[in-house]
Image (cartoon, grey):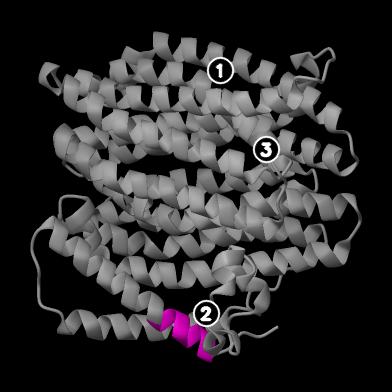
Amino acid sequence: MSRVSVSQGFFILSRSNLITKLISIIYVPLLLALLGPAGHGDYALAYVYYGSLVTLLSDAITKTMIRRVSAMEVRGETDQAILFTRSARQLSLALSLIVALIVALASRGLAGLLHAPDLWLSLIVLAISLVFVSLAAVYRAYFQATRRMSIAGNALVIEQLINGCLTIGLSWAFLSRGVIYALAGAAGGTLIGGLAAALYLHYHFNRLSREVVGRVAWEPVFQLIKPLLGLSFMLQLCLMLEALIVKRRLAGLGLSEALASMTYSDITSYKMAQSIPMILLSALASALYPAITESITQGDIKRFYRRIDQALRHSYLITLPASAGIALVAKELTAFAFDGRLQREQLIIAGAFMVIPMSLAMIQQAILQSDGQLVVSQLPLIVSAFVQVLMNLALIREPFGIMGAPLAGYLGLISLVLTNHLLLKHRQVELSYIRDLGRPLLASGLMSLGLLGLKYWLPPVSGRLNHLGQMLFLVGVGGLIYGVSLLLLGGIRQSDIRTLPPGLLNKLPRSISRHIKE
């Protein structure tokens, strides 16, 4: 259970998150085929509310934990860090039990409010899973704060693997009894996956902490997180309200309840496509957060800015080609992973470039939170969520129709980046957003031109597997064009390739190494 550097932590979490996303890419199409587009839309809607409740229960606690535990570890207060984690665990258990009980009792009313009456039983199952997922989040925060990234990463893979297998298995097993039970079976996979992750993390935490004794109480932790918890409640309420408004606005476009559910399923498709590059960026932010906290605690401003600059460079290296790539393979992705409908493809193309402002906002938030300004850092998120709610109300109507949803997303993200920037500027933290933008942007442009020419030359295909093969071919060629262009333009540095594992790093050919700048 050794500690790792920022680069190693980034690679470990990236690897784990990539595995979990591959699992999702496999089981989501199967679930869509089982439940149908309307059932999948209701399933996705339930998970918006479930995700908001998970964040509400874990966000304030884990952010406070990472900040506190990181600082304690820097000062050598290992026992205090363990006791603080136990206190946070106690509080998380109490809060999650209360919320789970409320959701379970209100499940029928909530399902009716969402115009998805088949969801009530799955909401009860998801309510129970809140307890295990919240506890797992506390443990994961401890391991991230102490830079034991392999444990945190392994827990993610275990959770998603069990979740994926049982979501499909239980949904299929209960499908003959009706959509209500099939949706509940899908939620059962989430419950058992969360339980498995919590047990795995508890085992490793117990190995580290069994020798540490001392009294713990949840009240001091609650006093610490109370302001942040209130803001988190406002934020998640906005996000849940947004989901409800989107569903109602779809009905306002003249769609039946079934068509509105199908269209909501289409909206989730572009968010799934965005998540592929975002898993790398979330791993980067997770590894960066304790490292920035450490540099602030030690008063090393030079190191602080060096890590921020590195994060911005990596975000451009990932998001610029990823955005263009998602837009260019949207047709193949839709045909392979979903049902091939044109509206899904159009939404994926429309939302592809959201990952660029999303990545900037993620890094800005990591900087704001690392200095202990956890309450202040929530304000831009609330502003962004409120803007997005208003924009969905205003734009999901003619002439925009369903395309008003991604447009509202862009406006919400732009407001988030601008508000974050103003707060950072007020704290005299200066970020250079364009210094490292040019070369990745030019290389992404060359990649896009190459793929457009290749798509024009390739013959049309049919069938899921053929579309998968063509998508992988396009991704491989695009990656090769981007990598070669970036090397020739001098856009890769030695600090960038240090994120690779040592075994792979040693195998880089000299023809590549000589193009890499110091």
Q: Name the residue under label 2.
A: 440
Residue 185 higher or lower than 319, as above or below: above
Residues rendered magenta in the picture: 481-488
The reply to whether the C-beta atoms of the residues labelled 3 and 1 are less than 8 Å apart is no
Q: Magenta region, mostly helix, strand or loop?
A: helix
Number of residues whose C-alpha sits closer than 10 Å to that of mark 1, classed few (under 14), some (14–19) or many (20 or more)? many
Q: Position of residue 463 (x, y in %)?
A: 9, 58
Q: What secondary structure is found at the residue carrying circle 1?
A: helix
Residue holding disc 1: 96
Label of residue 143 in the image: 3
Task: Identify the residue at horizontal 48%, vertical 55% (top origin).
Answer: 278
Q: Marks 3 and 1, how far apart in space?
A: 21 Å
- Quadrant of the frame with the C terminus: bottom right
Whether residue 365 is visible here, answered yes or no, is no
The reply to whether residue 292 is in sight is yes
Residue 112 in magenta stretch? no
Label 3 vs 1, first from the N-terminus: 1
Q: Which residue is drawn at 23% across and 52% down?
A: 337
Q: Nearer the viewer, residue 483 or 100?
A: 483
